[in-house]
Amino acid sequence: MLSRTCCFALQGVEGVPVTVEAYVSGGQFAFTMVGLPDAAVRESRERVYAAMKNNGFTTPSGHVTVNLSPADLRKEGTAFDLPIAVAIIIATRQIRAVDASNILLLGELALDGRLVPVRGALPLVLSAHEHGIREVILPADNAHEVQAVQGMLVYPAHTLYEAVMHLTGAAPLLAQVQKSYDECLMERTVTCDLSSVRGQTGARRALEVAAAGGHNMLMVGVPGSGKTMLARCLPGILPQMTLEEAFETTRIHSVAGLLPPGAGLMTERPFRTPHHSASMPSLVGGGANAMPGEISLAHNGVLFLDELPEYSRTALEALRQPLEDGVCTVTRVRAHTQYLSRCMLVASMNPCPCGYYGSTVRQCRCGSHEIRKYLDRVSGPLLDRIDIHIEVDAVPIEEITDQKTGESSKVVRERVENARRLQQKRFASAGIVCNAQMNNKHVEELAALSDPAKALLARAVERYALSMRGYTRLIKVARTIADLRGEADISAPAMAEAIQYRMLDAKYWSR
């Protein structure tokens, strides 16, 4: 007998429909699987047969052929276990014939028949919904991940037996109650609050400007001055993610297998901080299956590179194109895919190998050649793509022991969100959401400068020898500061503050 069930295969962060066909005929026992299965899919036979026996079903005694259609698409992962098992059970007439071709089946099978969570559940369910499928049976531990998908009947199952009994109607499963996105946002928590930061008034202001415009940021300062803590506070002052952004972010993390069992939709912006020994493929993506890298895992959030000069020069240079385009293309022999990578790059570094060049609290012991060599590990083109450069010095003991706390993340986020609303209104027809994403045409049309601001900008470009990219990014930062000030045009004070955030080039890299 021939039977068909429905599944989806992952390609990047998208799902491709796959029909699982099972044909059981007489003759000597044999099992054949076709349709470009990888090793994990081929090994499903052992898991499926053991799960069937341990859940009260019998394994076929004749020749079994399983086809995964379309046959020219490579199938990877363990999500095909459940649809293969159900297709074999229907083909061997152990249950009455049911039409399972319009029900998405996902799940890895343990040997005792339990349904084990799989990676990529959210992108697979979203893709199924786009293809008109409205029901899904999946492992219970994957159910929270898809709880915000509206218009979908989600049936969490714990075992193969539960899934089969639901299909026959003998013991229907209860559909999961889906959540609205507003309900998901209520569960959002701020992991690091700005109120816990002592001093650093200038750095806090720079952090607010960066958050308001989505700008990249570099902090240069002595060890222990609070650079890492400031960076960790950044997600808490960024605007709340929209539903579309939450789906994009969760999709990438789900494909990478980084969502813990039982995790729901990601509503907190990601904060990724790879170690400085990270390789180029780990940052931009790669591996045999073209998995997403750190810059894609930070999509809609923050990629924090601590001790920037310690990273491989090759790895840092590979970030230039994804930072500019917001998309990272990963090409390997067996896979070619694109991952979104529109994130804020926040980096920190010491001004010299010992860390105390220019410090007011300790004397630097490095020679000029050592300092030059250390700073040259960060290339000019990469620095040019960082909008805001800020110097962070040690916090005086008086400010550390002061019981007075600074503004909380909630207060700062309100100002950031007000500035972002102005930008959303300005860019309603431009296809972008913040000032950092403006191209040259947007800058000319939507970032008007007052005459004093133009004069100030011209003097800054001449004095600091800014490139065309640096010139454009200076205007973008000034536009953000003007939004925080509630100004329609960029004024001279807004431009002056923006220029201050580009002065470290002259202090450190022009020595």
Image: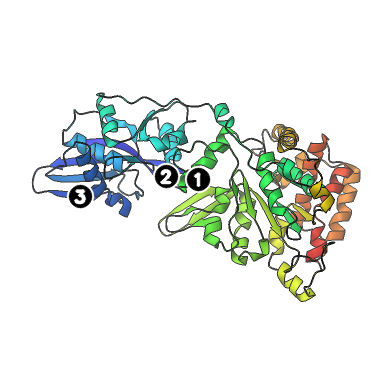
Q: Residue at x 24, y 42 (%)?
A: 51
Can residue 385 be seen in the rendering of this structure?
yes
Give coordinates of residue 126: x percent, y percent.
Answer: 45, 35
Please say if the residues under marks 3 and 2 sit with CB atoms less than 8 Å apart: no
Local secondary structure at mark 1: helix
Other-residue count near label 2 (Cα within 10 Å), few / some / many at <14 / 14–19 / ≥20: many
Which residue type carries mark 1?
His
Residue under numbered circle 3? 32
207 relative position to 331: left or right: right
Front residue of this view, candidates 467 and 195: 195
Q: Quadrant of the N terminus?
A: top left
Q: Residue at x 48, y 38 (%)?
A: 263
Q: Quadrant of the C terminus?
A: bottom right
Front residue of this view, candidates 347 and 214: 347
Residue under numbered circle 1? 253
Give coordinates of residue 378: x percent, y percent.
Answer: 69, 64
Q: Residue at x 60, y 62 (%)?
A: 276
Can residue 38 be seen in the rendering of this structure?
no
Mark in front: 1 vs 3: 1
Mark in front: 3 vs 2: 2
Residue 119: give its label. 2
